[in-house]
Amino acid sequence: MNHRQSGPRPPAASPPHRTPRPSRSRGAVALAAGAVLATGGALLPAHPAAAAVPAVARTTVDDPAQYVNPLVGTQQSATDYGNGAGAGNTYPGAAAPLGMVQWSPDTVNNGYAASYNYNDNQIRGFSLTHISGAGCPDYGNLPFMPVLGTAPVGSATFSHANESASPGRYAVTLDNGIATTLAATQRSGVATFHYPGGATNSVTVDTGAALNPASGSITLGPDRISGYTDGGNFCGSGNHYRLYFTAVFDRPFSAASIVPGSNQKALLSFDTSTNATVTARVGISFVSTDGAAANLQAEQGSSTSDQVAAATRTAWNGLLGRIAVAGGTTQDTRTFYTALYHALLAPGVFSDTDGRYPGFDGQLHTAAAGHAQYADFSGWDVYRSQVQLLALLAPHEASDIAQSIVNQGSQAGYLDRWTLANSGTGIMYGDPLPVIGSSVYAFGATDFDYWGLLWQSWQGTVKENERPGQGPYLSQGYVPSPNWGAAASTTEEYAVADFAVSQLAGRLGHAPMHDIMLHRSTDWRNLFNPVSHYLQPRAADHSWPAFDPASQNGFAEGDSAQYTWMVPQNLRGLIDAMGGNDAAAARLDPFFAQLNAGPQVLNAYLGNEPSQDVPWVYDYAGRPYRTQAVVRQALTQLYSDAPGGEPGNDDLGQLSSWAVWAALGMYPETPGRAELALASPLFPSISITRENGPAIDISAPGATAGTPYVSALSVNGTPSTHPWLGEDFVAKGGTLQYALSATPSPGWGAAPTDAPPSFDVGPAAPATGPVPGPGGKCLDDNGGSAADGNRIQLWDCNGTPAQQWTVSPDGTLRVLGKCLDVNQGGTAAGSLVQLYGCNGTGAQQWWPKSDGTLVNTPSGRCLDVPYGDTGDGAHQLQIWDCNGGTNQQWAVPKQ
């Protein structure tokens, strides 16, 4: 079909603006050019000394890495609802913060995307690359497998009693007696294989094995091997990448060969008669074998395995220690720091230590000095809260992540939804990468080409490979069902992305783009059925197909009961459309009767992303005590420090980031903004020390799992009844002092003026008066009737109530208690305009533009006097293509 390409266009005087990116120094391996770890340097720069904060003591924590259990998420604890095995899909192996290498064991019968199943006792190899928590497998490249003697094996058994995992280090003694220890830097790893006996023992390295079909090539040397492996096909998408490697051993091979019949699998044997421990050092690169060797030298030098592990642990402590918690139970502390660890594994650094990386255009590029390119963006997942956490704690790295998105877009010509290595996969829905960039900017990570991001995001709204179904979305205000997969949730996702882009445009001073995208962000209303009060799939002819709120038809990994709440940019508008706070609460309470019930029920599915914002909706509905209860219940019941301690796929840190925010008692509910909705802190004392940024200190004496309810709050020493924090608090830092209780305080934060902000399109305060139009006459409700469907016309201005129109904050134009409405929600030119009960739908959205037109936003068409005939009541008014004519000129009331 012909896809419409005439969506919103940038104003003529809006060329792309590029912002210079000043270079900055980094710590030892700080995500770009690395230093040798033998010096003891940290992988990330240490946070600055915190300034004194009155009234609240600073909290510190020694060695937070001791509380991390990388095995969390490796065992299924939730029902498998078909969205990724019901486990965290994490891996327990050695990894540095935001690293390229994740050297981890792969079990035989795993069924998990990260290739490790806690319930399996057979390891088939230790591969160098993994994705943490994805729902589909990929990577698992270059498995090393130590073997006794000189014959390859398929696997070896082990016991968890002989296994240990901590940040940057993994160790296991197999039942055959071989002890394997792994440590990692960002782009390299070091392994020791201790053999229990025998004069000759071996290790295999397989370039033809990965979690998806792979092939490769190996060059054998006297004490080293190098080569590459080709892999890909993430989620069946057909993506492809080539990973290079160089491995250096601590002694010459006694024999080295390619295993006959294999797809380039090396069998390397060693004389272990006098030294039973073989050490292998491996560097990887997506550029070349030379790049892999350079990465290895830069990040390890002559460091021992213990020194590498210690340096990486120091790096983890530097990053994990940016949030210090105190006073909680050991289990809660372990759950917290494990979640924070998992939230900071991805995306991974993709450029070599010299800055080179392969781009989405197939060409080599070089990151700016002092910066790094990142890869593996699980966009649909992490835009909700993981990237905001990263930006809060590590704005330099978050800025590089945003720049990586810009680079991907400029090289590929569009912004993909789920990118892996140096290509897009096209999987999942929405337009999440612009949301990620806008959100990290809002949280203070601004050292990137934000004008480039804005321009790419704007252009992407009319690209079918970036936004499938963008034609009808722009012309009708929604993606129709069943023409496009998950059309209803895709419409919601596009509206969220439009809002985030509008906020970035606003911050950069681009008012025209801000206004266009903000009005587009109301397109969720076009799926709001005023009869059912659900967001529903809608056909191209504007009809409502048969509907079941527990059906997944039209929705990705969820149903209407879950997705109806996914309007984070305008929860006030959604709640009002539902009938107000009481009506919304009456829906939310039974919704949370089950917390993780799956995708085809009327309850929450907190093991997957679309439900994760919903516990915080109570803050907007005048019931923050219910947010406090539900968040605490979900945190303590769905998460733990055990292998089964996650309620679903971790999705590159998204679920873990939710747990971190929940324990802090705050959440970035609105993408593209930095306000924080509040619940209550789990720990009596919390300090957040940001990289080169102001600190946040939280005091909550008596905080426990059983005291979730807020009875009082002071912000920077001033009492507050707001269950939210403004962007200025995130920017400037400050103190929070809570009084908590085991019993709810329903009155705290319940006033309408206490609710967090929602972002609608009308004026902050209503304005009422006549609407003069063509011929000097006024917009008029025929006969002053308030009947639904009453004719709207042009009439002599007479000051009657039928001509007293109110421009409302929710984007409606009201008279006699009802709304200006397009009949049947029509978007075609000539659709008639009538009076109708206000129902929260897009048919009642009107944008008074500065050129005097009154635009119906779903259709993009203007309120119009047919034929320009200005006779009293000559015609029922209509919407028509905006043409700048006098028959489309209106003057709405203003404050």
Image (tube, rainbow, N blue to C red):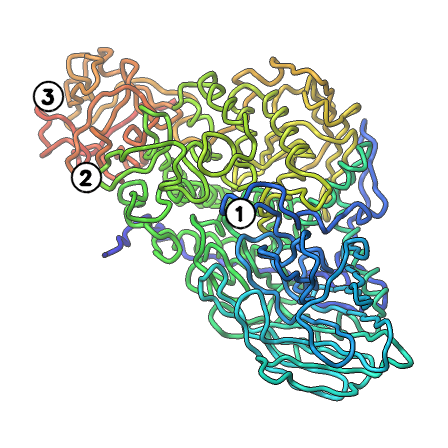
- The residue type indicated by label 1 comes to Asp
For the N terminus, the image quarter is bottom left
Q: Of residues 69 and 573, which is closer to you in this image?
A: 69
- The residue type indicated by label 2 comes to Ala
Neighbours of disc 2 within 10 Å: few (<14), some (14-19), many (20+): some
The residue that disc 2 covers is 828
Of badges 2 and 1, nearer the viewer stands: 1
Numbered mark located on residue 189 in the image:
none
Of badges 1 and 3, nearer the viewer stands: 1
Residue 699 horizontal side relative to residue 7, left or right: right
- The residue type indicated by label 3 comes to Gly
For marks 2 and 1 on the same chain, the one whose residue lies earlier in the sequence: 1
Mark 2 falls on what kind of element? loop
Between marks 1 and 3, how big is the CA–CA gap?
53 Å
The residue that disc 3 covers is 873
For marks 1 and 3 on the same chain, the one whose residue lies earlier in the sequence: 1
Between marks 2 and 3, how big is the CA–CA gap?
22 Å
Locate residue 335, reporting x and y percent.
73, 40
